[in-house]
Amino acid sequence: MLVQTFDLTDQEFAKFKELIHRTSGIFLSEQKKKLVVARLSKRLRALDLDTFTAYYRYITEDPDGAGEVDNLINRITTNKTDFFREMHHFDYLRDKIFPPLIRAGETGVGPRRLRIWSAGCSTGEEPYSIAITAAEAFKNQRGWDIKILATDLDTDVLHKAAAGIYPTLSVTPVAPEYLSRYFVREGSTYTVGPTLKAMIAFRKLNFMDSA
């Protein structure tokens, strides 16, 4: 079976570059033209459109295409993340940020309330890694209210993050004791347990939107 292919002219690419930048803040260099063709062609086929110009008009002029911009942005965004990626960040939280907060809470100088924002959370590995680090640091403390706001522009990855289901290979960086404590193994996958899920709220957020 032949798969329909599409050409993207320089003029069309310029229009999509402007639309993507205006709606998401993402800037595409000229070298990303092939990426745009590869990632958006599936949407053209799904919508039975013959050209990128028709797709652009569908998004910008057709009332039925008002929600299509989410699909556009979801396919353009790059989501690379891992559990405990750049471990020194989590070491810094554990060794430098959390101890003085705990001491302040114990002495009554500070509130026993902690709020953390994971921006660009992708499929959830970062906020869950933060949650594990916090849960371990505060496990012997009582009365602490700890919440993590995890946001991303891509609604597809947010759904995956909220589900919290990962293949065995993805959780390789997680220490075995944390896997047994905070995850539930189900065959070849690991599902984030209720302790971590209760700490995190996943939300869509576009930095280009006004507050």
Image (tube, rainbow, N blue to C red):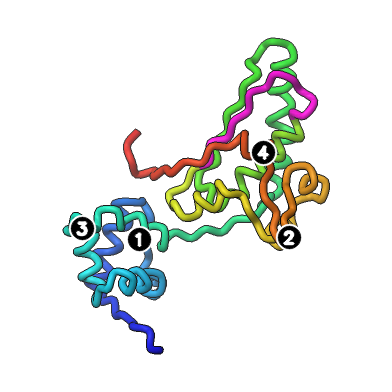
Other residues around mark 1 within 10 Å, as few (<14) / some (14–19) / many (≥20): some
* Residue 33 in sight in this render: no
Reading the image, the residue beneath label 4 is: 194
CA separation in Å, label 4 and label 2:
19 Å
Using the image as rendered, state which of residue 202 and residue 107 is in the foreground.
202
Q: Is residue 35 left or right of residue 188?
A: left
- Amino acid bearing label 4: Pro
What residue lies at 67% left-to-right and 46% top-to-bottom?
192
Q: Which numbered circle lies on residue 113?
A: none
Reading the image, the residue beneath label 3 is: 60
Reading the image, the residue beneath label 1 is: 72
- Amino acid bearing label 3: Thr
Earlier residue among tags 3 and 2: 3
What span is in magenta?
138-150
- Amino acid bearing label 1: Leu
CA separation in Å, label 3 and label 2:
45 Å
